[in-house]
C-alpha cells in the first residue's frame, strides 16, 4: 500500500486553552541545521499541554494528505462491504494524486457495490475539485532563515494562512524576519510586533502571559522524527555557550540579531536534560558567533570537559527502537502517533537487512514481525507493537550498532583568527575539536590566519577548515590569494585545511530577497564560475596544492582564465581539454584585437551570450559561440 496517512484527529480548543492545536512550519528549503527555535517553541507548548505538529516539505503534500485521508474516511462512512479495501484506497490515492491521468474514476467505481456508485462518485469528485483545507490550528509558527530564501518563506506564510483559525494566531520569526520585518509585512500583510516577531524569545511573556523564557527551554528533538527531511547536522547537541559578537562588522547580521553579547551560557544541565528526554547524542555542535571574544573562554572549555567531551571520548549510539517507542507513548494526538509508527515500521524493516544480513537470526526476526503483522504498513499498529516490543528488542539490542565512535566538538560558525593566541589554542587542544574552523574573510587578516594555523599545528590540531567571504568589498584575485596561502600552509605543515568560500549576500534591504547581488569588484560571470567550481567540489576546496591548482589555477593569470571559460569548459574540464575545445577557445580569445576583446568581455562579464546581433563584430559573434551551447555528457 502506498504511504497513506492515517486519519487525523483534532480537538476543538476554542474553549479550552490548555489544549491548543499548534502547527510549526519550516519553509521548504534545504538546510543543515534543525530549527532550534521551533524545537524550543514545541517544548514550550507541550509544557503547557498543547498539541504540537511539525511540518516541513511541499505544502501541496500537506493538503493532499489531508484530502486523501478525509476522502477515504467519508467513503467508509457509507459502511458498504468491500473485498479489497487496500486496492480501493490505492486507486483513490492515484486518482487524486494524478488527477485522473493514470486511472479513471469509472475503474475505481467498478470495485464497489453498484448501488453506491452515485454517492462515492460524488465524494471523490468533490475532493478532487472543490476540497478546501480546514482552518484547524489555534496557532501557526513559521520560522525563517536566510533572507534569500524569500520565495520559499513567503510560500510558507501563505500556507499558514490557509490553516490557522485566525490571522492573530499566525507568528513569523527567526533570522530573516528579524532582519527585514518591514519587507515581510509589506508582502504578507502581517504586522510587525504582532504577527512578525523580531529578535530572540529571551524574555517572559512574549507569546503568552506567563513567566517562561522560551530561549532557555530544553529543545524538543522528538519533532525531528515526525518529518521525512534529514538534517545533516542532526548528530549532536545543538546549542550556544555564548551569544552575540564583540565585533560590529558592517556586512554581518549578528549585531542585529543578537545585539547584546552574552559571554557565558552554562549548558550542562540542558545537555543532561536532552540526554534524559531524547537519548544521548554524539557530538557537541556550538553555534556561537564569536566564542573567543568571551573573557570567560577558560570556563567554557572547562564545562565542555566536565560534560565528558575530552580527548578520545567515545560514544555508543542509543537504542533508537526504544527512543521511538518512548516518543510514541508520550504523544496524545493521532497525527504524530502515525508519524512515529511510520518511522518505527521503516526502522524495523531496514534493521534486519542492514544489521543482521545473512545471519540465521534474520529469518527468525522477520518471522516474528510477520506473526504480529508488523511487516506491512497496513497492519502495523500500536497495540501489537507494544505486545511484541520486548521480543523485538532482544534482536535490536543484540544486533544494533554498539561500536564506539569518537565524539567531537564543533564551533560550527568559526573562530575569529584575530583572537587566536597560544593560550586559547592550548585550551582548544584539550577538547576533541574537529574540525577547527577559522575565519579568513579578508586578506588583511593574513598574518593572524597564518599564526593561528601554525599554533594549531604546534598544539597537535591538524584537521582544520576555514570560511572565506567573497563578493563583498574584496577583489577576485584576493580570494585566489587566500586559497593559495592555505594551500601553501598545507604543503608546509602537512596539516589538512579545507576551505569553504562563502559568497556574500546582503542580509537586509531590497537586495536581500534573492542571490543575485554582485559585489563592486565582481561580475555575474566570475560569480557563476566560482559557483560551478564549488558545485563540482561540493563547496569544499580540498587540501592538496595539486587539487587547488587544477581547480583555481597555478597563478592569478590562470585563475582569471578559468573564470572567463565557458561554463561547460569549467564543469567538464578534463573532457574539453581532451577534445581541444579549451585550446581553441583560448587561441581565439588571445587573437582578439583590443576593440573585439572589450566587446567580448562586456558580453561575457554580464553573461549576455544571447545579446549578439547584427551590430556585433563578426569575430566576436564567432567567439561567443563557445558560450552558447549546452553540453550534456549523458546525451550523445
Image (spheres, helix red, strand yellow):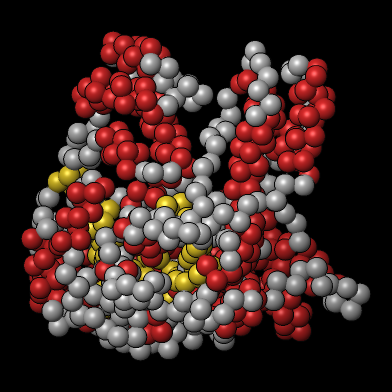
Say which residue appears at 35% left-offset and 55% top-offset.
49
Residue 68 x %, y %? 64, 37
Q: Is residue 486 left or right of residue 250?
A: left
Quadrant location of the N terminus in the rendered image: top right
Q: Position of residue 595 (x, y in %)?
A: 76, 84
Give x and y (percent) for residue 172. 51, 70
Give the side of residue 445 with respect to residue 270, left or right.
Answer: right
The outermost residue toward the front is 15
Q: Nearer the viewer, residue 604 or 316?
A: 316
Going 32% across and 43% down the picture, which residue do you hit? 330
Viewer-proximal residue, 562 or 75?
75
- Residue 301 seen in this snapshot: yes
Question: In this view of the protein, which residue sits in the foreground, 627 or 306?
Answer: 306
The C terminus lies in which quarter of the figure?
top right
Residue at horizontal 61%, vertical 37%? 69
Residue 9, image x, y percentages: 51, 42
Q: Is residue 411 above or below residue 316?
A: below
Q: Which residue is located at x 26 percent, y 60 percent?
A: 218
Amino acid at each position: 500500500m502506498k504511504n497513506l496517512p492515517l486519519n487525523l484527529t483534532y480537538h476543538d480548543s476554542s474553549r479550552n486553552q490548555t489544549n491548543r492545536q499548534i502547527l510549526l512550519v519550516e519553509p521548504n528549503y534545504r538546510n543543515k541545521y534543525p530549527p532550534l527555535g521551533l524545537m524550543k517553541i514545541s517544548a514550550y507548548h507541550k509544557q503547557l499541554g498543547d498539541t504540537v505538529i511539525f511540518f516541513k516539505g511541499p505544502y501541496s503534500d500537506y493538503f493532499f494528505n489531508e484530502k486523501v485521508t478525509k476522502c477515504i474516511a467519508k467513503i467508509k462512512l457509507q459502511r458498504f462491504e468491500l473485498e479489497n479495501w487496500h486496492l480501493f484506497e490505492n486507486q483513490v490515492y492515484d486518482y487524486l494524486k494524478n488527477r485522473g491521468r493514470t486511472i479513471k474514476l469509472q475503474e475505481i467505481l467498478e470495485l464497489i457495490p453498484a448501488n453506491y456508485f452515485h454517492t462515492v462518485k460524488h465524494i471523490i469528485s468533490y475532493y478532487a475539485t472543490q476540497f478546501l483545507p480546514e482552518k484547524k490550528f489555534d496557532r501557526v509558527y513559521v520560522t525563517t532563515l536566510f533572507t534569500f530564501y524569500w520565495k520559499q518563506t513567503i510560500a510558507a506564510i501563505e500556507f499558514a494562512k490557509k490553516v490557522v483559525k485566525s490571522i492573530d494566531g499566525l507568528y513569523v520569526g527567526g533570522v530573516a524576519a528579524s532582519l527585514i520585518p518591514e519587507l515581510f509585512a509589506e508582502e504578507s500583510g502581517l504586522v510587525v510586533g504582532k504577527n512578525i516577531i523580531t529578535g530572540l524569545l529571551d524574555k517572559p511573556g512574549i507569546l503568552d502571559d506567563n513567566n517562561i523564557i522560551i530561549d532557555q527551554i530544553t529543545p524538543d528533538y522528538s519533532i525531528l522524527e515526525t518529518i521525512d527531511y534529514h538534517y545533516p547536522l542532526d548528530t549532536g547537541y545543538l546549542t550556544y555557550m555564548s551569544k552575540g559578537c564583540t565585533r560590529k562588522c558592517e556586512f554581518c547580521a549578528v549585531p542585529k540579531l543578537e545585539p547584546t553579547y552574552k559571554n557565558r551560557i552554562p549548558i550542562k544541565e540542558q545537555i543532561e536534560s536532552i540526554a534524559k528526554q531524547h537519548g544521548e547524542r554524539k557530538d557537541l555542535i556550538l553555534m556561537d558567533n564569536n566564542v573567543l571574544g568571551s573573557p570567560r573562554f577558560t570556563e567554557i572549555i572547562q564545562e565542555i570537559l566536565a560534560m565528558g567531551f575530552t580527548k578520545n571520548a567515545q560514544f555508543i549510539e542509543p537504542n533508537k527502537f526504544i527512543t521511538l517507542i518512548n516518543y510514541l507513548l508520550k504523544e496524545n494526538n493521532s497525527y504524530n502517533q502515525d508519524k512515529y509508527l511510520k518511522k518505527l515500521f521503516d526502522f524495523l524493516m531496514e534493521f534486519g537487512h542492514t544489521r543482521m544480513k545473512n545471519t540465521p537470526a534474520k529469518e527468525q526476526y522477520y518471522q516474528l514481525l510477520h506473526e504480529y503483522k508488523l511487516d506491512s504498513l497496513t497492519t502495523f499498529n500500536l497495540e501489537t507493537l507494544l505486545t511484541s516490543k520486548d521480543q523485538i528488542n532482544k534482536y535490536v539490542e543484540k544486533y544494533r550498532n554498539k561500536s564506539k565512535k569518537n565524539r567531537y566538538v564543533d564551533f560550527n560558525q568559526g573562530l575569529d583568527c584575530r583572537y587566536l593566541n597560544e593560550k586559547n589554542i592550548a585550551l582548544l587542544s584539550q577538547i576533541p575539536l574537529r574540525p577547527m574552523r577559522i575565519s579568513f574573510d579578508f586578506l588583511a587578516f593574513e598574518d593572524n590566519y597564518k599564526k593561528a594555523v601554525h599554533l594549531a599545528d604546534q598544539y597537535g590540531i591538524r584537521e582544520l577548515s576555514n570560511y572565506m567571504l567573497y563578493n563583498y568589498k574584496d577583489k577576485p584575485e584576493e580570494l585566489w590569494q587566500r586559497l593559495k596561502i592555505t594551500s601553501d600552509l598545507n604543503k608546509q605543515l602537512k596539516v589538512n585545511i579545507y576551505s569553504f568560500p562563502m559568497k556574500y549576500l546582503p542580509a537586509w534591504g531590497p537586495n536581500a530577497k534573492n542571490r543575485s547581488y554582485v559585489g563592486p569588484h565582481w561580475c555575474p560571470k566570475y560569480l557563476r564560475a566560482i559557483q560551478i567550481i564549488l558545485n563540482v567540489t561540493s563547496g569544499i576546496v580540498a587540501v592538496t596544492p595539486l587539487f587547488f591548482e587544477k581547480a583555481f589555477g597555478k597563478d592569478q593569470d590562470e585563475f582569471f582564465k578559468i573564470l572567463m571559460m565557458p561554463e561547460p569548459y569549467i564543469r567538464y574540464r578534463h573532457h574539453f581539454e581532451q577534445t581541444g575545445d579549451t585550446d581553441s577557445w583560448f587561441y581565439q580569445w588571445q587573437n582578439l584585437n583590443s576593440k573585439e576583446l572589450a566587446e567580448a568581455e562586456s558580453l561575457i562579464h554580464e553573461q549576455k551570450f544571447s545579446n549578439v546581433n547584427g551590430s556585433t563584430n563578426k569575430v566576436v559573434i564567432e567567439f561567443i559561440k563557445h558560450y552558447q551551447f549546452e553540453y550534456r555528457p549523458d546525451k550523445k
